[in-house]
Amino acid sequence: MTYDFDLFVIGAGSGGIATARRAAEYGAKVGIAEFDRLGGTCVNRGCVPKKLMVYASRFPGAMEEAQGYGWSPVQSSLNWEEMITRVNNEVTRLNGIYQRMLDNSKVQIYQGRAKFIDSHTIEIGETKVTADKILIAVGGTPVRPYVPGIEHALISDDVFNMNPQPKRIVILGGGYIGCEFACILNGLGTEVIQVIRQDKILRGFDDDLRTEIQEGMIRHGIRIINNIKAVEITKTDNGVSVKVQTDSEENILADAVSLAALGRKPNTDNIGLENTGVKVDEAGMILVDQYSRTAEEHIYAVGDCTSKFQLTPVAINEGRALADTVFGGKSRVMSYENIPTAIFTSPEAATVGLTEAEAIEKYGSDRIKVYRSRFRPMYYTLAGKEEKTMMKLVVNQETDQVLGAHMVGDYAAEIIQGVAIAVKMGAKKADFDATVGIHPSSAEEFVTMR
């Protein structure tokens, strides 16, 4: 049978675009459909605009710290509207770059929502196309779990368009998205109250990392209400009222908004999966094998709509591996072991490999040795601030292999990126010890821990 395309991609986010371009490089005829702006969550509502706002939020601290080095006090104020405009202008610029990259790759772009008519036919508005191979890369979206009055809460996507700046905000949720936005808004001058169901933020991360970040957030002025049993949101004339129930009950008035950051779900609704043999799990995540194949062998899925890791570089690598395998004759699979990740809170954190708890569960406590270091970086001595950096290595005593590396502190993401190479290669603690440190630096602590 003759098809319109060798590959058709549903969703022009990071994973979809990476796959489309790589397949086109191998000579495949490729089409791609997107109903929103090119670039997906990362470029438009995630990594990029969020990191720009992280940078903006850290200038007040830097200006204050400069005084410890002899600089005169700086009187400065934030123009929220200008900051938001500049951030969104950068997003628009990146949209244009993606457009040019797809055009240069001769990938045909369809603007609109794509839906399966059958396992080889896609409908985009009034247009129908057929494809030999089809990739689903529709990503995910924030969820609104049932909370009384949740319709009065913004989701995390809305932060990039809030205007004016809220003076006081309640953030629901202790995951990395909620924690990052709590720190961003706090740094920009908003009073932040974060409400979490557990004792500590960032469930699933290393326990020492969770403790260090939470203590740092509190030290920076964020109020965290933990162990909540119920939340109720009510719209008022001046904003919202959030009723929080722990062992007691408290009403919090937020003058502007209440931000819900309570997880994400795949964008797999209404794309016609019922017209295919593609299988999903209870959460709607598409089930795939190691080659990103669904239950229909010619239909693939990558990125946040699958049951794998929800990280932009993972989606890109999955897509490129797919294109290499299917169109390039270079069979390879994505490795999900030792994937580094960062949390752009204040303090910043990054991690790679097993947590201490995971290592103990896998190997037993008698086989695990943990190295920790906690100190005040030199930068803060003259600034007179009690900021701390925490570094941690989790080691298998029998093999001396470093199973995990975790850090909280300035430039954690930049430092762990390099450490991740060593962990990925199976480096031993002796290899870290034999490496000469760069002095004076915080990073040298990873090769001097005893």
Image (cartoon, grey):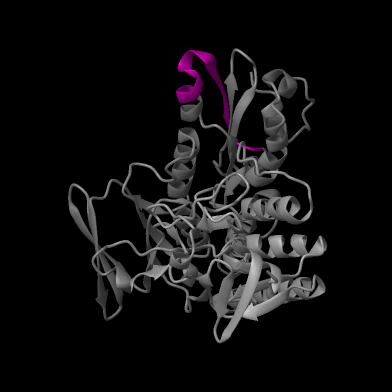
The quadrant in which the N terminus is found is bottom right
Would residue 260 appear left or right of 21 to someone viewing this image? left
User: Which one is nearer the viewer's eye here, 12 or 238?
Assistant: 12
Q: In front here: 3 or 71?
A: 3
Left/right of residue 221 with respect to residue 367 in the rendered view: left
Measured from the top left, where is residue 162 in percent x and y?
48, 75
* Residue in front for this viewpoint, 133 or 229: 133
Q: Identify the image quadrant of residue 194.
A: bottom left
Which residue appears at 68% of the width and 20% of the height? 429
Query: Residue 70, position in %: x, y?
Result: 70, 52
Residue 88 can be seen in this image? yes
Q: Residue furthest front?
A: 1
Q: Residue at x 44, y 60 (%)?
A: 265
Name the residue rendered at 70%, 56% in the picture: 71
Is residue 37 magenta-colored? no
Q: Quadrant of the C terminus?
A: top right
| 435 lies above or below 413 | above
In this view, the residue in front, 108 or 186, is 108
Q: Quadrant of residue 124?
A: bottom right
- State the extent of the magenta-drawn residues as a range: 360-377
Q: Residue pushed farthest left?
A: 248
- Measured as percent of width and height from the top left, residue 73 is found at 63, 61
